[in-house]
Image (tube, grey):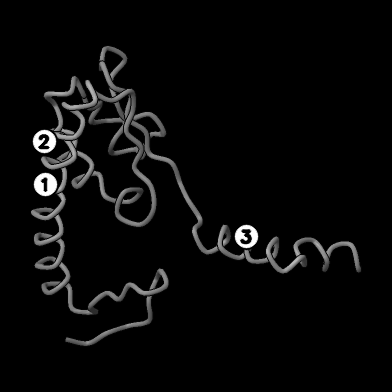
Amino acid sequence: MMIREPAVAGRFYPRDRDECRQLLKKFVAAAELKSSVRNSKSAVLGGVDGVVFTAGIGENSPEIRRRICEASSWLGIELDNDANDARGPRISTDSSKVSVWTIPTNEEMMIALHTGDLLGIRGAARSAG
């Protein structure tokens, strides 16, 4: 397997498309399993108000969002397929009991901002110029 530089710190992706597809299938299966475990937690809590998809796959894979929402349909999630394909931001129907959203994130920027805050240097470059 050939490895390329991480798109997100600590995560590596294969260059080969077929291998990437196989890994994606494994991820989907794992996500569906995790979804059923999370759903059992939701049952104990009496349901959920909303679901938010973020980051790499959550933001960029309508197929993964669709599968997870289908596996969670017992919660009252109704996916708007057109909105899902268009990346939302709201991807649930108006009649869905649970609102579902796709929210873009920038983890690297947030890490840099929080680090700057901890070191007391956030905004120092702007105020020095």
Q: Residue at x 38, y 47 (%)?
A: 54
Cα distance in 3D space between marks 2 and 1: 7 Å
Judged left or right of residue 36, residue 6 is right
Q: Secondary structure at mark 2?
A: helix
Name the residue type under label 2: Ala
Label 2: few (<14), some (14–19) or many (≥20) C-alpha neighbours in 10 Å: some
Q: Secondary structure at mark 3?
A: helix
Q: Residue at x 18, y 78 (%)?
A: 16
Label 1: few (<14), some (14–19) or many (≥20) C-alpha neighbours in 10 Å: some
Cα distance in 3D space between marks 3 and 2: 35 Å
- Rendered view: 100 above or below 27: above
Badge number at residue 71? 2
Judged left or right of residue 64, residue 60 is right
Residue at the spot of label 1: 32
Badge number at residue 68? none
Residue at the spot of label 3: 114
